[in-house]
Image (cartoon, rainbow, N blue to C red):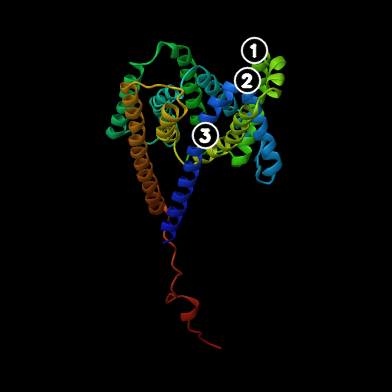
Amino acid sequence: MASKAATSIMETEMFMGVGSWMVCSMGMLIFNKQAITAFPFEGSLTALQMLFTVLALLCMAYRSIHIGSWKDALRWSMVAPFFTGMLLTSILALKNAPMTLVIVFRSLSPLVSIVIERFYPEPLKITGKMVGAIAVMVSGAALYVSQMDHSNLVGVQWVLLNTCFAIADRLLQRLMLARDQNPVDISKTGVTLLNNALGMLPLFLVAAFNGELAKAPAALTALGGMGSFWVGMSCVVGLGISYTGIWAQSLISATSFLVLVNANKFFIIFIEAYLMGTKILTHRQMVGAMVSIAGGIAYAMVRQQIETEAAEKGERQKLLQEPPEEEPPEASATGPSSQIKVGP
């Protein structure tokens, strides 16, 4: 009974963590797409989002911030450059390419992450179903690219670079957050604070190199009502995705997390193509995007099944290795209670 209750709690936490991240992820793409159009300074926009997150955490969640030691903080500092690179290249990709292109190319992330995860302390096995799901994702991506407009080629380099940063970020976070790997003694709010505080430093260098420091303040002041709304909401959702991304990553594998990046993008494609009207897809591109995402969902289901089976196997092995409780020794014939006193 206790085991079933613990499993139920874990499943509920996984549903909440992954679900919250998916909502924030979808919002981040949409709001960033609008924000970078209204405020075309990628370095300053990303730094502004990080500053908002740091101030919000220090004001509202400072009691939950826990960093076990300097060693843990130094270990986690390896994540910050990849986290910053992922956010910055995501802005640049959205600035130069449609959201659908970003979505489709990210579906190829598991191809790399699944290989690197083989070197983890506790790697999961690879099955035929897993390989088949990846093949479906790759086929869908190839179908989409075959009909891609040549004007999007400028954004492809940023999409590919963003995918590389995302892979490195998720793999490192998985290694340092998952209980079955090599976790750090830092709370979720603590690693969120470190990611954003450390990430602002290189962004100031990017902004200075691009000449944004002289232009961005005036552009920010001149934002209209809708422009301010998009920039403000991108900061709010950036705070949400910083925390929920770490939360979700601590519950599932890096490969599963990268696949979930794609699984919630049906809504993104629908919004971009039919509500926002910022991208017109051909029938072949629409089919390719849907096939790629469907492969991602199938992969997530297969991966989840493998992870569940591995966890159950680990629990069984743990129970078998535990020594049985020792029974109290019974009184023997030569024990004190059976001795016969002879003589005076």
Q: Is label 3 or label 2 in front?
A: 3
Q: Image height check: is 306 above or below 222?
A: below
Q: Which mark is residue 150?
A: none
- Residue count near mark 1 (Cα–Cα under 10 Å), binned few <14, some 14–19, many ≥20: some
Residue 306 lies, in percent from the top left, at: 35, 41
Disc 2 target residue:
43
**Quadrant in which the N terminus appears:** bottom left
Tell me what residue is drawn at x 34 percent, y 28 percent: 292
Residue 195 lies, in percent from the top left, at: 61, 31
Instruction: Count the marks.
Output: 3
The answer to whether the residue labelled 3 contacts the one labelled 2, judged by CB atoms less than 8 Å apart, is no
Q: Secondary structure at mark 1?
A: loop
Closer to us: 119 or 330: 119
Amino acid residing under circle 2 = Gly
Closer to us: 100 or 189: 100
Residue 268 lies, in percent from the top left, at: 44, 31
Residue 21 lies, in percent from the top left, at: 50, 39
Chain-order first, disc 3 or disc 2: 3
Chain-order first, disc 1 or disc 3: 3
Q: Secondary structure at mark 2?
A: helix
Q: Image height check: is 307 above or below 290?
A: below
Q: Image height check: is 287 above or below 209?
A: below
Disc 3 target residue:
27
Look at the image and tell me whether residue 175 can be seen.
Answer: no
- Residue count near mark 2 (Cα–Cα under 10 Å), binned few <14, some 14–19, many ≥20: many
* Mark 3 to mark 2 CA distance (whole Å): 20 Å
Tell me what residue is drawn at x 57 percent, y 35 percent: 237
The answer to whether the residue labelled 1 contacts the one labelled 2, judged by CB atoms less than 8 Å apart, is yes
- Residue count near mark 3 (Cα–Cα under 10 Å), binned few <14, some 14–19, many ≥20: many
Q: Which mark is residue 210?
A: 1
